[in-house]
Amino acid sequence: MRARAGRLPDPVRISFLGGLGEIGRNCACLETDGRIVVLDCGVMFPDPDMPGIDLVLPDLSYLRERAAAVEAVVLTHGHEDHTGGLAYLLRDLEVSVFGSALTLGLARHRVEEAGLEHRARFVEVGDGERRTVGPFDVEFIPVTHSVPHGFATAFHTPQGVVLHSGDFKLDLTPVDGRLTDLGRMGALAQDPGIRLLLSDSTNAEEPGYTASETTVGATLQRLFEARPGRRVIVTCFASHIHRVQQVARAALATDRKVAFLGRSMRKNVDLARRLGVLELPEESIVDIEDVDEAEPGEVCVISTGSQGEPLSALALMAGGESKWLRLRPGDVVVISAHPVPGNEWAVGKVIDGLYRRGAEVIHSAVEPVHVSGHARQGELQTLLSITRPEWFIPVHGEYRHMVNHAQLALRTGVEEKKALLCEDGDSVVLDDEGLHRGDSVPAGFLYVDGTVGDVGHGVLRDRRVLAEEGVVLVVATVDVHAGEVVTDPEIVTRGWVHAPEAEALLEEASRTVRAALQEAIAAGATDHESLHRHARRALGRFVGERTRRRPMIVPVVVSV
Ligand SMILES: [Zn+2]
Ligand SMILES: [Zn+2]
């Protein structure tokens, strides 16, 4: 698609709103001629240092301010780090949303919960299809991953082909036989050539190749066979339909019926069966309510909670609080997932709880009951060698993953100056000359707690101090006209010292504040602001000197 003489083809601008520097909240914008297509709109799950935060979103203000120009959202696959932000985006704009039937089905759950499905026009696309999406001609190329029916997307633009890998691995024996279409990507590399490749960096530090998903099925079958007469409970991600399929196959092969536990598991299984992605005859399913009465060796429960989430089905089981399932000695629990970084501790606690109930626990450290959905170094280099991009930007990863991925690209022959490291908020412009860095865009973390938008960095900083050091409040009444502190200031604390055992310390603190205020008034301080400042400073110093702690200090000075 080169321009005719006299007019240069429009440049293509790509802006990264999230996903480059963290695993999560993947979101990029591709635009040309003033028209924008959004590629994925995901959430990130909070780190342990974000107390009370439910979710983290990309800053969507770039899109909100250009709402009229945003023509569509393309979803590469159904994971929440790619689709979970859609419900928030739809608050501000109405768009067409393109993706595979399963991807759209998974994405719809959250959109429907928010009551916003009328603001989106969902457009299903099949493997290998080409569609006009906003200003681009987009080709949907199958890839293997840990959720079925994911796509790489080839954007045919005025500046040539921009290929985005999506989340992928090169599974040569996938559960459904649907392979990553390297043939098509190779053909694109041949004609018209790939101008720019954006590729998944998650496992760029891992040498070798990720094992096939079907190896997990073989392991499960072996484990099930070796435990006749015993009840088996398997937990995995609710969107990992191929894992669910393999657990179900192993269960049926060992004469066990299958029950599903956990809201998202039941929802996703219903969806996948309806779409024919999950094959499971009705008569092989047993209701979770009937599991406790069934013979232990005749049932297999597939459950949510593989990340140790506190209210998940598995955590409740481990705590003996599950309404549906009372664990007994002899039960076997298989954790068919890796803890996402940050969740290791929570998963460890759940495993402890399961052992306390007498269950045997099998997890990925003791048996190969899990494989990643992301390509390792060997696969990443294979993709680079097949696609032979002129320019390369590693995406989807923490900074170190992207650095390693860029180095892999150089080894496959990408020129050093043509492998660009970008981060959230960066933009690049592809034109006739090549790829340049563009203006930056807002891309901060948007914290969601309850309803979106009311938790900023300041609130989060306060929460961290409160969580780590507690709070000390002093309430003092002053009579500025008489020039005196009326009563002994009252000290109230949570999380600094246990008040009933620290009476003397609190009294001393009160006297210290009283003296400081008295002195300040005598020196002429009468306004609220300076009285507050004196109270805070005196109390802060006292607390620091006497306890070597730094709680939040809140002065309340009332004048009469
Ligand atoms: Zn994914
Ligand atoms: Zn992802």
Image (cartoon, grey):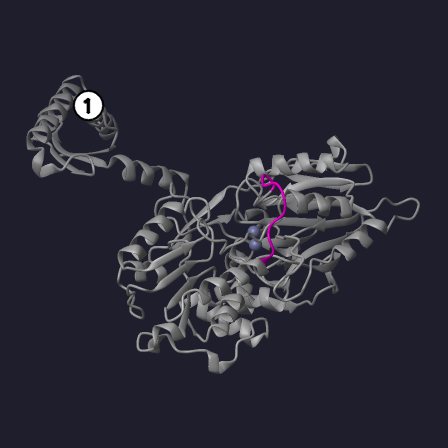
Q: Is residue 318 left or right of residue 13?
A: left
Query: Measuring 72% from the left and 46% from the top, which residue is drawn there?
Result: 382
Instruction: Give how far across and how far down residue 152 sits, in percent.
Output: 68, 55
Instruction: Give how far across and how far down residue 27 sits, in percent.
Output: 59, 50
Q: Quadrant of residue 278?
A: bottom right
Q: Nearer the viewer, residue 284 or 324?
A: 284
Q: Nearer the viewer, residue 237 or 229?
A: 229
Q: Nearer the viewer, residue 458 or 160?
A: 160
Magenta segment includes 212: yes
Query: Measuring 37% from the left and 62% from the top, which residue is drawn there?
Result: 332
Above or below, comparing residue 251 to residue 197 in the picture: below
Looking at the image, the residue that sits furthest to the top is 523
Instruction: Give how far across and how far down residue 145 sits, in percent.
Output: 60, 57
Above or below, comparing residue 34 to residue 126 in the picture: above
Residue linked to disc 1: 538
Which SS type dominates the magenta stretch?
loop
